[in-house]
């Protein structure tokens, strides 16, 4: 049995709901946060003028809060007036004088951040929450690529065609890593791959897939724990097998 501290990163503009020393349950709400969507409006096109002339038609300033349907830009002539309303309620985020694009940032509904496991809050900062948990075993690794992962362990040792939807949203343990396996795991939406051998990879193409290189002896140990939940912490370079 071992103690393991996991850092749960927080999005910007988050309100934390727990404090240091508090015991928390799996699935407990630990924070709420707002998500923001950026809406780009092509004012030059809508007004029918060259982009470089768009700024003179703006009726709002950077940082200004606007309500939906408020007029944000307008042109007038002897024969007609063209007014552009804001498509959303939000805040003026940016304006590009070269393209005539105005960006408004709008808040979506608040979302809850849930703890993926039980534990004790060790530290709370604006960057994240550190949670101390009990792990059955903690393994070190030297190299990885990707982000922190919490997921269920599954083993793959057959032909590539057997890597199917049952491996989706899972941490794939394998004896041999090769490019086609990486590509297939990405395509079906696996969370991570754990393997003993290193290969050359184009890291720019590893979208949302974490890869951990682990010693062969540890691969053998983990085979006994297929179906269990694990944490991969790429900052600490540690892998924690959670208690059942």
Image (spheres, grey):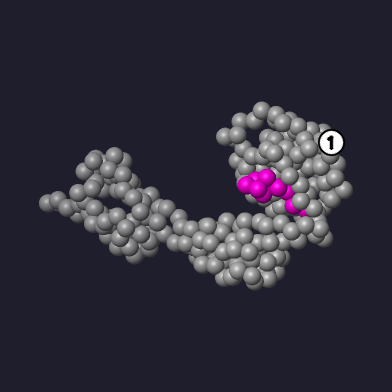
Q: Residues within 10 Å of mark 1 (few under 14, many from 20)?
A: few
Name the residue nearer the viewer: 7 or 104: 7
Q: Is residue 179 above or below residue 94?
A: above
**Secondary-structure class at tag 1:** loop
Q: Is residue 158 above or below residue 139?
A: above
Count of residue discs: 1
Question: Which residue lies at the image location 64% right of the left edge and 71% below the top edge?
Answer: 22
Tell me if I can see residue 82 in this picture. Answer: no
Give the magenta-colored segment's residue range. 233-241
Q: Which residue is mark 1?
A: 158
Q: Position of residue 61 (x, y in %)?
A: 26, 56
Q: Is residue 205 above or below residue 171?
A: above
Q: In this view, which residue lies farthest toward the right?
A: 224
Say left or right for 101 vs 121: left
Instruction: Check the picture and name the quadrant holding the C terminus.
Output: bottom right
Q: In this view, which residue lies farthest toward the top?
A: 200
Q: In this view, which residue lies farthest toward the left?
A: 78
Name the residue nearer the viewer: 165 or 191: 191
* Residue 84 forms part of the magenta stretch: no
Question: Which residue lies at the image location 34% right of the left edge and 50% below the top edge?
Answer: 94
Question: Which residue lies at the image location 31% right of the left edge and 48% below the top edge?
Answer: 95
Image quadrant in which you'd find residue 142: top right
* Residue 238 forms part of the magenta stretch: yes
Q: Position of residue 69 (x, y in %)?
A: 32, 62
Q: Position of residue 98 (x, y in %)?
A: 29, 39
Q: Position of residue 72 (x, y in %)?
A: 28, 57
Name the residue nearer the viewer: 12 or 236: 236
Q: Is residue 133 above or below residue 56?
A: below
Image quadrant in which you'd find residue 100: top left
Tell me if I can see residue 128 in this picture. Answer: yes
Question: Which residue lies at the image location 56% right of the left edge and 59% below the top edge?
Answer: 128
């Amino acid at each position: 049995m071992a103690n393991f501290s996991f850092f749960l990163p927080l999005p910007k503009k988050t309100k934390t709901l727990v404090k240091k020393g508090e015991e928390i349950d799996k699935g407990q709400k630990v924070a709420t946060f707002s998500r923001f969507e950026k809406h780009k409006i092509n004012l030059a096109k809508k007004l029918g003028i060259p982009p470089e002339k768009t700024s003179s038609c703006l009726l709002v300033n950077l940082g200004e809060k606007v309500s939906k349907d408020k007029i944000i830009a307008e042109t007038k002539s002897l024969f007609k007036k063209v007014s552009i309303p804001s498509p959303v309620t939000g805040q003026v985020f940016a304006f590009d004088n070269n393209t005539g694009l105005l960006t408004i940032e709008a808040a979506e509904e608040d979302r809850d951040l849930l703890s993926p496991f039980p534990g004790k809050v060790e530290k709370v900062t604006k960057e994240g929450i550190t949670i101390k948990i009990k792990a059955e075993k903690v393994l070190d690794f030297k190299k990885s690529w990707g982000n922190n992962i919490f997921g269920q362990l599954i083993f793959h040792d057959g032909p590539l065609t057997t890597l199917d939807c049952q491996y989706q949203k899972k941490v794939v343990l394998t004896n041999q890593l090769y490019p086609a396996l990486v590509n297939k795991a990405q395509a079906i939406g696996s969370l991570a791959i754990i393997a003993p051998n290193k290969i050359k990879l184009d890291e720019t193409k590893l979208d949302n897939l974490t890869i951990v290189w682990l010693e062969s002896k540890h691969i053998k140990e983990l085979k006994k724990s297929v179906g269990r939940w694990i944490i991969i912490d790429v900052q600490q370079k540690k892998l924690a097998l959670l208690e059942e």
